[in-house]
Image (cartoon, grey):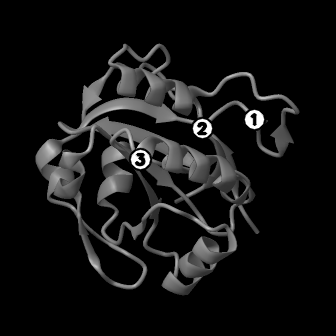
């Protein structure tokens, strides 16, 4: 049975994530290849999406995430799906195949990113720049406004608004929102 959680985040100012800790992190792809976080420094921004393969919210957001990843890749923004260490590789691969994920999927075996971002909900997104300053954290949009409750019309696209601001050199208006989804811990 899935556990759901609505997390309220309080008091957010642009903060720098511990750069040496994050940049030295070693994550792995589901097939065991090493991914070095310092590779993200070549990108204008990196979007880390914490996911669970059996979370309905994660499943439902795959089309949006695939679309955004494709759209912003050419502008220097890379997306990464991050799974906690308890998720088995075969479940991640099944998720990738079923939902045709078009961005890299990683496993945070040592919970370095989970800890650095203090991530507890899937899906939740964290956008950093090349110097590891946290630019945006929270939900993808306001489609899911409470556990099991969805709007018919999405009126706020906070993640995309942040990406538009980043890629156009403007200030991000909303830097933090409340993610709604499944409990990671």
Depth check: 4 or 20 in front? 20
Task: Indicate left or right for 40 with 19 as reference.
Answer: right
Secondary element type, mark 2: loop
| Between discs 1 and 3, the one toward the N terminus | 3
Q: Name the residue under label 3.
A: 73
Which residue, as the protein is rendered here, is positioned at the far front? 74
| Between discs 2 and 3, the one toward the N terminus | 3
- C-alpha gap between disc 1 and disc 3: 23 Å
- C-alpha gap between disc 2 and disc 3: 17 Å
Q: Name the residue under label 1.
A: 143
Residue 30 rendering spot, x and y as whole percentages: 43, 79
Residue 116 higher or lower than 12, as above or below? below
Question: Which mark is drawn over residue 156?
Answer: none
Q: Which residue is pictured at 74% across the width and 54% down the height?
A: 60
Q: Mark 2 points at which residue?
A: 140
Q: Mark 2–mark 1 contact, CB under 8 Å?
A: yes
Of circles 2 and 3, the one toward us is 3
């Amino acid at each position: 049975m899935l556990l759901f959680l609505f997390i309220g985040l309080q008091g957010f100012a642009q903060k720098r994530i511990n750069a040496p800790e994050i940049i030295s992190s070693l994550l792995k792809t589901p097939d065991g290849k090493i991914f070095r976080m310092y590779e993200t420094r070549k990108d204008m921004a990196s979007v880390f999406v914490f996911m669970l393969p059996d979370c309905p919210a994660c499943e439902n957001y795959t089309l949006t995430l695939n679309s955004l990843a494709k759209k912003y890749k050419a502008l220097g923004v890379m997306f990464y799906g991050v799974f906690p260490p308890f998720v088995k590789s075969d479940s991640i691969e099944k998720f990738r195949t079923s939902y045709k994920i078009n961005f890299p999927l990683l496993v945070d075996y040592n919970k370095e990113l989970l800890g650095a971002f203090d991530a507890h909900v899937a899906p939740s997104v964290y956008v950093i720049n090349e110097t590891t300053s946290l630019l945006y954290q929270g939900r993808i949009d306001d489609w899911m406004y409470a556990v099991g409750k969805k709007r018919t019309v999405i009126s706020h696209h906070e993640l995309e608004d942040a990406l538009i601001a980043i890629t156009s050199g403007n200030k991000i208006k909303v830097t933090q929102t409340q993610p709604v989804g499944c409990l990671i811990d």
